[in-house]
Amino acid sequence: GENVEQHPSTLSVQEGDSAVIKCTYSDSASNYFPWYKQELGKRPQLIIDIRSNVGEKKDQRIAVTLNKTAKHFSLHITETQPEDSAVYFCAAVGSQGNLIFGKGTKLSVKP
Amino acid sequence: EAQVTQNPRYLITVTGKKLTVTCSQNMNHEYMSWYRQDPGLGLRQIYYSMNVEVTDKGDVPEGYKVSRKEKRNFPLILESPSPNQTSLYFCASSLSGQNEQFFGPGTRLTVL
């Protein structure tokens, strides 16, 4: 089945710097790659997603890139702010149509 | 209001005492899923359901059962809970596995 690896597990940046989180997946048939943000004590929420027919997608300070050949995708956050501090999860759809999550990245943005 | 609800939100129980965590959604979603969240292990899928009467095992189904008799409900059943099932559980629903998943508020379970 699908396997999603996510790195790094923790990331600390200064406010205003950029943050990059990378994920790889194993199933070459996967075609949907969402990113979720989970603030402390809250439920995960979708922040951006990308489908396999697109190489990059942006939404204000957040962007996701996809390299289907290499089977990896990345989340880029520019001009980080303290409210970006959270755990971020990448995910990919497995061959059975179910969503498989990475282990998460704890991002800390220091003021 | 469109939402996913879970009950109970918190539960402390003892080994071997059967329990059910309910999950309900009012968005007419076909896809529903259960995850457990443990420190350092992320969100691991327990079971998922593509539609009514269709359920499949996720990555960590041992010790759990589910049913999908109606589209809106997807209960998680622990027939004989053990301490290693102490965790934070999330239910989620979406139109399909390839659409935004809406998570419930979570159920924190402690098995003594």
Image: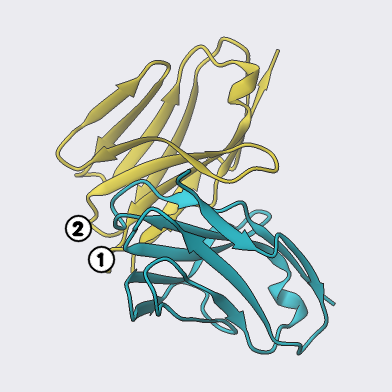
Chain colours: A yellow, B cyan
Of B29 and B101, nearer the camera is B29
**Mark 2 is on which residue type?**
Ala
With B105 as the anchor, is B18 left or right in this view?
right
Q: Is residue B11 above or below residue A85?
A: below
- Provide the chain ID for the residue under circle 1: A
Q: Which residue is mark 2?
A: A29
With A105 as the anchor, is B28 left or right in this view?
left
With A83 as the anchor, is A52 left or right in this view?
left
Relative image position of residue B47 (x, y in whole percent): 46, 73
Q: Secondary structure at mark 2?
A: loop
Quick one: label 2 or label 1, which is nearer the N terminus? 2
Label 2 crowding class (10 Å Cα cut-off): few <14, some 14-19, many 20+? few
Q: Disc 2 and disc 1: Cα gap in Å?
A: 7 Å
Of A70 and B64, nearer the camera is B64
- Provide the chain ID for the residue under circle 2: A
Q: Which residue is mark 1?
A: A95
Identified at 55% across, 53% down, the residue is B104
Q: Is residue B60 above or below residue A61?
A: below
**Mark 1 is on which residue type?**
Ser
Of A95 and A20, nearer the camera is A95
Label 1 crowding class (10 Å Cα cut-off): few <14, some 14-19, many 20+? some
